[in-house]
């Protein structure tokens, strides 16, 4: 853009004259330098520089950053035990048969359109999801006391639930287990809640610190929100027994603590959808209220499609109706309405008896493969005479094993053995195969016997 | 016998009291008020509930063909056929599909944009336009907490919700001139001038929602110059690229002017309308930075905001966009199909205006053809709109905004007649 003398009125366009008048008005009384700076060359980036120049680069996400580092590694023996995405025995991602069938059905249906879903999402999906987690015969569903909204996988369900609580619940503190998924504290903090922790994992037993858990929840202020992993605790794989769940339930109800379940692995933990939902159903059975965030990322392999649901079980149907209307006010300014594709796939599968049954078999196969990897790793360590008690590998449940390795040991395994995991020593069993178990066992043996 | 029954009855009562003891406690949510219906999405809900065979939905901005049917573009169907059965559905990175973002930036910044070459743009895939605006608002709050956002009057109602939930202070600027049903240019320029230096402004890149009133190219140049003088930040919401004139490059003119003038802008792009991908929630947020290093930094911070909201964006819609824009033949087909949609709407504007004039309306309906894009700001009052709904089963938002995409050769006569009836005495 050339520098013009806009103050002259000869041979200039109407807009030039207007700009000239404007400038004279704006710059009256200032010196020429300021005037000329307005006409700096187009790529000079404006007089003030960027409004975001003060930013520093954010650290890589601890979990997703592992895969990024893994991808950069050229070693042929590298092993990714970082993010919890299922892999087959061949180390390949898996798309379930039922998902491919559902996809085909959707493609072949030319009557399907891509209109906006309602703010609450695909209604049929919502109903089926509530039945899946609460049980088809759940009294809460029968009595219309549940509101379910489709959300962006587990993350989105937790965030929407958190924002709802921050606005409408009288207690703004949520207690999360120590440790927990790294994204939990960030989600709830940004949702507007304050985050505290309760004891959960006992490093000395590599099991549940049940006494500590009961003490901490017992000491929490009346009405506090408590985040509970429904099954297959992430990252430890340590779950309470049913008897322990019953004690937790009694304690929480006596103190009016609000349960917020994160259900990311229903069916993946034990291989049975109903078994893995039992703790939630115990809480629903006592007639009380709760929130549950469901994810279909792992159990239906729909990771990238971001499919999940938030259900809030209320005391009465009219309450559920009002709660739903307020959930919509949280969702609309966040993303207006949820994505249609993944939820449609889930609905096709859940509504069809045959597809549903086929899904339960595929789910059990994934869970069984993981259980088999646990056994194999345990045996491999025993065969090497690796010092220490490794029974936690077969006692822990779900996709992850909390090895008990420290960050220095993890770092050594990455450098020397090209094995990638999060620095808290969590390994994704889903990333293992019979072929790679020996490599991992060698690495663990090496770091444990070294003085690190 | 009676004794036994009494005992078991009382045991039963005791048990049910233990359980119902919880039920008798009141709900934690009893103080939750019923929320008001969304002013836009609530219209479609009401429309769907109406049993009248004459009903017309000119509420929400979703395109309809001349039979009033929603459209899935052929290029989209073909892209889906190619994708089906091939995708592994793995998580996208937090910033979304790189391929989709790259193609999307070309649309906004130009195929040969120096800013793309120099890697100066921080960009992430977003949950359509809403998600892009929200991410930017959260970003603005986090890194410029003392800033405020200037929003035009009127605007898409959800803009206010978005910046409010991000807890960014809102101000407004003059935009629509009710008397002329056009742009209040001097009011706009006054507000831009009077805003504190370095203010953040929300601009509709083209096809302003809800008015359909856009600045001329000349006016955009003047706005840009004034922005420079005031060091303001321009955030463009571009939800209708291609839909306004039928030509995506032309519809991005306002953005290109600001880029030429050296502004570091932010852009929200949506594929909801121009690719008909509404429910897929596909869009892009971009922020032009000083250099590549800063772009990397800004992108990393945008991802930090996305991670606790949804972790990573949905895959399917992004795959559709990449497939189409990455294939010259499919992209050519898309451009044709967008033009067909834009042309049909322009045709309906003409038809509606002519019908109203033929009916002998005492009012001027010039604005129907002057305004551009999916919406026509009719100038009708809420009371007149209510009459249209209750007497004629015509559904639109109470600000008098008509979604021209919902007008067809089949209903334009009925619509014109109804509008004439409720406005002829005003």
Image: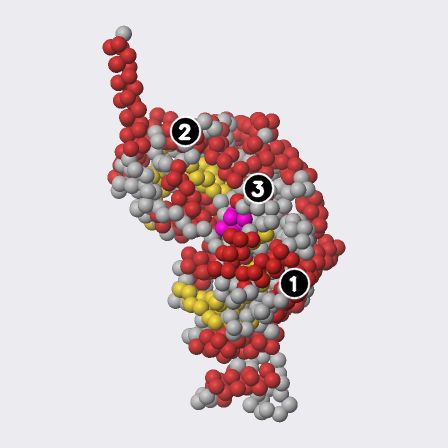
Real-space Cα distance between discs 1 and 2? 57 Å
Question: As drawn, is A58 to the left or to the right of B68?
Answer: left
Q: Which mark is residue A139?
A: 2
Real-space Cα distance between discs 3 and 2? 28 Å
The furthest residue to the right? B329
User: Taking A362 as reference, is A447 above or below it?
Assistant: below
Q: Is residue B45 magenta?
A: yes
Image point (36%, 48%), residue name:
B33
Magenta segment: B42-47
Host chain of mark 2 = A
Within 10 Å of disc 2 (Cα), the crowding (few <14, some 14-19, many 20+) is some
Host chain of mark 1 = B
Residue B51 is situated, as x and y percent measured from the top left of the image, at 56, 44
- Secondary structure beneath dot 1 equals helix
- Secondary structure beneath dot 2 equals helix
Residue A312 is situated, as x and y percent measured from the top left of the image, at 41, 39
Image point (64%, 57%), residue name:
B412
Q: Which mark is residue A168?
A: none
Q: Nearer the viewer, mark 3 or mark 2?
A: 2
Q: Nearer the viewer, mark 1 or mark 3?
A: 1
User: Taking B38 as reference, is B367 above or below it?
Assistant: below
Q: Nearer the viewer, residue B379 or A209?
A: B379
Q: Which mark is residue B355?
A: 1
Q: Is residue A70 magenta?
A: no
Identify the coloring. secondary structure
């Amino acid at each position: 853009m050339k520098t013009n003398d806009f103050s002259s009125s000869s041979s200039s366009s109407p807009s030039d004259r207007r700009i000239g008048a404007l400038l004279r008005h704006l710059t009256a009384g200032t010196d020429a330098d300021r005037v000329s700076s307005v006409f700096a060359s187009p790529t000079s980036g404006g007089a003030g520089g960027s409004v975001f120049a003060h930013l520093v680069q954010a650290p890589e996400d601890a979990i997703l950053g592992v895969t990024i580092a893994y991808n950069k590694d050229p070693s042929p023996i590298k092993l990714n035990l970082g993010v919890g995405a299922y892999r087959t025995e061949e180390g390949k991602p898996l798309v379930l048969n039922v998902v491919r069938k559902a996809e085909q059905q959707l493609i072949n249906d030319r009557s399907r359109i891509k209109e906006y879903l309602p703010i609450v999402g695909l209604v049929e999906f919502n109903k089926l999801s509530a039945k899946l987690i609460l049980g088809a015969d759940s009294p809460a569903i029968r009595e219309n006391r549940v509101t379910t909204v489709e959300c962006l996988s587990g993350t989105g369900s937790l965030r929407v639930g958190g924002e709802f609580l921050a606005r409408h619940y009288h207690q703004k503190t949520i207690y999360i287990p120590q440790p927990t998924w790294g994204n939990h504290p960030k989600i709830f903090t940004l949702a507007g809640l304050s985050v505290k922790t309760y004891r959960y994992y006992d490093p000395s037993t590599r099991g549940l610190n049940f006494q500590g858990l009961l003490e901490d929840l017992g000491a929490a202020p009346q009405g506090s929100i408590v985040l509970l992993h429904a099954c297959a605790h992430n990252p430890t794989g340590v779950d309470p027994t049913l008897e322990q769940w019953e004690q937790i339930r009694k304690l929480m109800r006596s103190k009016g603590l609000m349960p917020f379940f994160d259900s990311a692995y229903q069916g993946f933990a034990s291989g049975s959808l109903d078994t893995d939902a039992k703790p939630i159903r115990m809480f629903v059975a006592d007639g009380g209220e709760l929130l549950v965030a469901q994810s279909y990322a792992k159990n239906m392999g729909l990771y990238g499609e971001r499919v999940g649901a938030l259900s809030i079980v209320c005391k009465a149907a009219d309450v559920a109706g009002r709660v739903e209307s307020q959930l919509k006010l949280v969702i609309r300014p966040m993303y207006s309405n949820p994505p249609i594709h993944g939820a449609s796939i889930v609905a096709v599968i859940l509504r069809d008896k045959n597809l549903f049954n086929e899904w339960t078999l595929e789910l059990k196969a994934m869970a069984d493969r993981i259980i088999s990897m646990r056994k194999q790793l345990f045996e491999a360590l025993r065969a090497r005479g690796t010092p220490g008690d490794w029974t936690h590998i077969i006692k822990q449940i779900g996709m992850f094993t909390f090895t008990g390795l420290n960050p220095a040991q993890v770092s050594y395994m990455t450098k020397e053995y090209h094995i990638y995991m999060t620095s808290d020593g969590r390994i994704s069993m889903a990333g293992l195969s019979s072929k790679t178990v020996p490599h991992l066992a060698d690495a663990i043996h090496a770091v444990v016997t070294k003085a690190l | 016998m009676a004794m036994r029954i009494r005992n078991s009855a009382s045991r039963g009562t005791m048990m049910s009291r233990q359980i119902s003891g919880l039920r008798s406690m009141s709900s934690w949510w009893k103080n939750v008020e019923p929320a008001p219906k969304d002013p836009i999405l609530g219209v479609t809900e009401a429309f769907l509930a109406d049993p009248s065979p004459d009903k017309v939905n000119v509420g929400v901005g979703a395109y309809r063909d001349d039979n009033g049917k929603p459209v899935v573009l052929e290029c989209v169907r073909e892209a889906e056929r190619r994708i089906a059965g091939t995708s592994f559905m793995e998580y996208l990175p937090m910033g979304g599909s790189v391929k989709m973002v790259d193609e999307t930036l070309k649309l906004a910044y130009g195929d040969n944009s120096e800013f793309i070459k120099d890697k100066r743009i921080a960009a992430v895939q977003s949950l359509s336009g809403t998600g892009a605006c929200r991410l930017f608002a959260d970003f603005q709050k986090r890194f410029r907490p003392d800033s405020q956002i200037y929003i035009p009057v009127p605007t898409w109602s959800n803009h206010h919700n978005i910046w409010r939930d991000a807890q960014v202070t809102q101000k407004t600027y003059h935009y629509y001139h009710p008397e002329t049903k056009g742009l209040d240019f001097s009011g706009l320029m006054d507000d831009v001038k009077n805003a504190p230096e370095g203010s953040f402004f929300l601009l509709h890149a083209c096809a302003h929602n809800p008015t359909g009133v856009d600045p001329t190219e000349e006016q955009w140049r003047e706005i840009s110059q004034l922005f420079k003088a005031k060091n303001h930040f321009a955030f463009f919401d571009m939800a209708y690229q291609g839909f306004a004139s039928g030509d995506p490059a032309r519809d991005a003119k306002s953005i290109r002017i600001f880029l030429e003038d050296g502004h570091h802008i932010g852009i929200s792009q949506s594929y909801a309308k121009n690719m008909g991908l509404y429910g897929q929630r596909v869009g892009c947020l971009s922020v032009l930075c000083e250099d590549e290093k800063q772009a990397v930094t800004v992108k990393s911070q945008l991802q930090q905001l996305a991670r606790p909201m949804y972790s990573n964006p949905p895959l399917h819609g992004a795959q559709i966009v990449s497939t189409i824009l990455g294939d010259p033949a499919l992209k050519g087909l898309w451009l044709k199909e967008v033009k067909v949609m834009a042309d049909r709407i322009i045709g309906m504007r003409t038809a509606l205006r002519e019908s109203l004039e033929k009916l002998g309306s005492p009012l001027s309906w010039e604005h129907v053809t002057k305004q551009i894009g999916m919406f026509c700001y009719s100038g009708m009052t809420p009371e007149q709109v209510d009459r249209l709904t209750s007497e004629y089963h015509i559904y639109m938002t109470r600000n008098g905004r008509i979604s021209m995409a919902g007008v067809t050769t089949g209903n334009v006569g009925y619509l014109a007649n109804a509008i004439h009836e409720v406005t002829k005495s005003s």
